[in-house]
Structures are given as structure tokens and as C-alpha cells.
Image: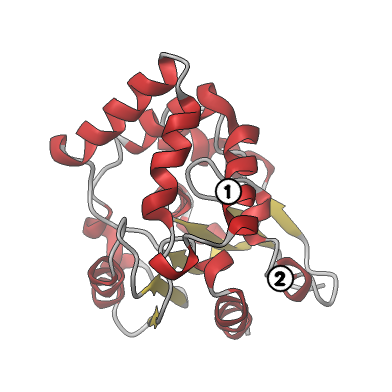
Amino acid sequence: MQEPLVLIPGLSCDASLYAPQWPALATGGRPILVAEHAQDETLDAIARRLLAVAPPRFALCGLSMGGYIAFEVMRQAPGRVTRLALLDTSAKPATPETNTPREQMIALAQKGAFDNVTTLLWQRLVAPVHLVDEPMRLLVRRMADEIGAEGFIRQQRAIMTRPDSRLGLAAIGVPTLALVGEEDLITPPAEAQEIAAGIGANAKLVVVPGCGHLSTLEAPDVVTGELLAWLG
């Protein structure tokens, strides 16, 4: 049987974030599990929920918030992860400066203005060339609606308490893909470069031209190829 794969979506995203990659990743009957990441308010709880239903050993891939959760999984159960893919994410901890806009978005969502939140986020999620991609915008909006305002608030609170994952980078001994869009405004290429450098020889760094934060949707063929190579 093919090595099982666990996918973790990003903030306000669901399994559709990986829809372009799914057919290729599932080839050969590979079991794929998409983590539930909108029911808990801490990364610790989200990771424990994931580990409770995941296979004994699995490859792990997370994008953005999914990467923060992946780091927490590595802290809790490093022996269960066979390989690691970190897409458009960061190992840095939350800070008052990074939390301020998140608090503002939570306040908007609590006031019933979640539509405004998703509209504002869209402007930073993709490269400028993709801002006019209406099917992509509608998909991002549909995923956000599926997560909902309450799920979004829980996710933000979890992100706002994330620890410094840089401290554990050198201990990651599994094959790791650190991939980022060259035009990612949320977690710029320097973040992926820091991750790859911290992990060392086990890490492969990929910077995707013409791509923003949602690499799986913006550069689907490139990301699919890199994930297949990572899975071996």
C-alpha cells in the first residue's frame, strides 16, 4: 500500500485547497486524510485531534496555518511522520505585531462582517496576476464560508499563540519540502529559506515564480510535481 498522506489546509481553507493535487497524490490507492483544523482554539489541541485519527505513520503536508500545525505535530509525535512538506508558512512565533491585524479580523467577524474579512484577505492571498481570477476567488470564498466565522475565530486564536518552531528545526530528520510563492506577501520566501536552512541537508527549498500565498491553487502543476517528487 502507498504511504498514507495527511494534508492540513490553511486558514479559512478546506480540502479544496489541495483539489488540483488530489488525483496525482491519490494514484496507486494512497490513503489521504485531511485534518480537521477549525474546531479547536490551540495548535496543541488541533494536533492532538489530528494524531488521534491519523495512521500510525504518515507523510505530512501543511500550507500556511497548516504548516504551524505540522510543526506542532512534529513536537508531539515526530516518530510518526515519515516526511514533511511545508508550503507557504513560517517557523517564527506569533508576536504582538503579527497578532494586531488578527485581532482586528476577529473583531470584524464577531460584528457580523466576516464577508469583509474574506474580501480583505483575498487582496493578500494571491499574486497580483491572479487577483482577477474569478473562479479562484470564488473557490477561496466558498472555502471561507464552509469554515465560517466561528471556525475562523478559533483558527486565528490558535495561530496567535503559536510558539517559536525555529528552535526545533535542526531536529527534523525526515525529507522535508519547503515551498513558497515568490510573491507571497503573508509568508515571504525568506521564511521558507529560514526553514530550509534550519533543517539543513534533509530540506529542499523551492521558490515558485509568479505565485503568491496559495501555491496549490496558483501554481498547481508545479506544486503537484514537487509533492510527487517529495513522496518519492
Element at label 2: loop
Q: Which residue is mark 2?
A: 3
From mark 2 to mark 1, how far is it between C-alphas?
A: 29 Å
**Label 2–label 1 contact, CB within 8 A:** no
Nearer the N terminus, badge 2 or badge 1? 2
Q: Can residue 55 be seen at all in this image of the molecule?
A: no
What is the x, y in percent for residue 54? 67, 49
The quarter holding residue 181 reads bottom left
Residue 170, numbered circle: none
Which amino acid does the dot numbered 1 rest on?
A: Val
Q: Which residue is mark 1?
A: 140
Residue 212 percent across, percent down from the top left: 41, 66
Q: Residue at image x 31%, y 70%? A: 192
Up the image or down, 122 lies above or below 217; here it is above
Above or below for 175 versus 212: below
Screen quadrant of the C terminus: bottom right
Q: Residues within 10 Å of mark 1 (few under 14, many from 20)?
A: many
217 or 45: nearer the viewer: 217
For the point 61% across and 33% down, the residue is: 145
Q: Residue at x 37, y 22 (%)?
A: 108
Location of residue 144 (image quadrant):
top right
Q: Residue at x 49, y 66 (%)?
A: 130
Residue 119 % position (x, y)? 45, 40
The answer to whether any part of residue 122 appears in the image is yes
Q: Quadrant of residue 136?
A: bottom right
Is 151 on the left or on the right of 197, as rendered? Answer: right
